[in-house]
Amino acid sequence: MIYQRSSQLFAEAEKVIPGGVNSPVRAFKSVGGTPIFIKEAKGPYLYDEDGNRYIDYINSWGPMILGHAYEPVVNAIVERAKKGTSFGAPTALETEIAALAVSMVPNIDKIRFVNSGTEACMSAVRLARGFTNREKIIKFAGCYHGHSDSFLIQAGSGAVTFGSPNSPGVTQGTAKDTLLATYNDLQNVNDLFTANPNEIAAIIIEPVAGNMGCIPPAEGFLEALRELCDVNGTLLIFDEVMTGFRLAKGGAQELYNVKADIVAFGKVIGGGLPVGAFAARNEIMNYLAPVGPVYQAGTLSGNPLAMAAGLEMLKALNNDAAIFERLEEKTAYLENGIRKILEAKNIGYTINRMGSMISVHFDANPVTDFKSAAKGDNETFKKFFHGLLNEGVYIAPSAYETWFITDALMYDDLDFTLNAIDKVASAL
Ligand SMILES: *Cc1c(COP(=O)(O)O)cnc(C)c1O
């Protein structure tokens, strides 16, 4: 493939945008090379500025669950745009999407819309702190909850000590309120509660982790966290920015039948426009301004274009009884195909999958937490990534990312992908 125009565009972008990108992973840093610049997309396909076509397994990191330029969403945006793009005053549309979301997701009475998953998680934590009148939170290493200060924390010196900032600009003061735990390690979470009695406002977790590859929760793990939270007067926050409206209508709460106290959304809920949201039962949501004391606001929150896109997306998912089954079947087909190929070629691997989230790790040992995810062979991944790109298959440019399967993929596309993987794997 020729990437001449993409390379030129990247060079120009680097002059006026830090690293040439508006979000770091897009820069291809961990796989090398220069990013491809996208010109347009339709269904399961991306087209770059050099005219190359790719089957897309990123799908904007999840939102395009029904494919790119999905017509009902595009039409809704266009029609709304003609009537004005922002008012900073309430619209009927906001109530309509809120009511639909509340009807689809278990255990929530009210929902507040924001502009990104970051904002949703940040606000969920503030609400949990306000509601419990406590300051500390537990997060899991390798889980991503957006780039707000409280979440940019790495392990401190010991497993039961405070976290420390993992980005300059995050203060020690902030870091000391985030306790870091190991995913799927219940004893570790228990120890944190013991060391910080009556101090923990919330546990925030990706109920199926998707930001260190895909890592499903161990059997009983989410249930045990629920119980620990109940015993300790701590709120359980499910960050369903990735899993919400993807694993099931009601997300991971529905799939695992575990109740969260606060749920954060993003990605699919915006139909491809910048939207996040957080939701909870009345008792908690009524703690928010203007009815309650916890402040949260947004000039463009509930933006009519974004709400129109999100509403069409949620309607499409809600009205299609077989959507999540189809996604499951397509992703299982892909998984089985990749397993056969890698086994035939004797390549050490682990594939993790939950519904339409799947990740391929180049390590034969189970991947259950951040440490085991980090053991994957990055040199092999780099070759795999660039090989696939060259064959017209676009997966995430990092070994720590999940592939997101879209319903726009047909079995011909999956077979095309498996052929490409077979070819690339032969050269690994
Ligand atoms: C993407 C993501 C976020 C952050 O959402 P943004 O819209 O990028 O701010 C938060 N949590 C999870 C689980 C995510 O996957």
Image (spheres, rainbow, N blue to C red):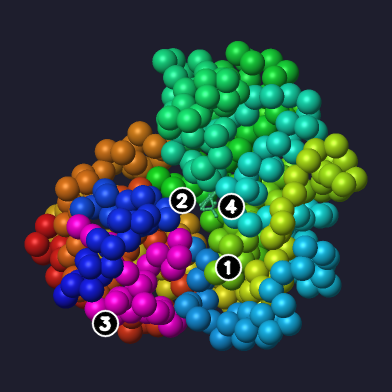
Q: In which quarter of the view is residue 203 placed?
A: top right
Q: Earlier in the sequence, mark 3 or mark 1?
A: 3
Rendered residue at 39%/61% (across/down): 403
In the shown orientation, is residue 64 left or right of residue 378?
right
Q: Is residue 313 magenta?
A: no
Q: Which residue is mark 4?
A: 117
Cα distance, mark 1 to mark 4?
A: 12 Å
- In depth, the one of 146 and 209 nearer the eye is 146
Disc 4 to disc 3, C-alpha distance: 32 Å
Q: Can you tell which of label 2 and label 1 is closer to the viewer?
A: 1
Q: Which x, y percent locates residue 103?
A: 78, 65
Does the closest atom of ligand 1 sit within 8 Å of the Cβ of label 4?
A: yes
- Secondary element type, mark 1: loop
- Magenta residues (range): 33-61
- Ligand 1 closer than 8 Å to label 2 CB: yes
Q: Is residue 382 left or right of residue 82?
A: left
Q: Is mark 3 within 8 Å of ligand 1?
A: no
Query: What is the three-letter code of the residue carrying label 4?
Result: Gly
Give the answer, above or below, for where 322 lies relative to 270.
Answer: below
Structural distance between the alpha carbons of marks 2 and 3: 31 Å
Return the residue at label 3: 51
Q: Look at mark 1 in the image and give the residue it sits on.
A: 273
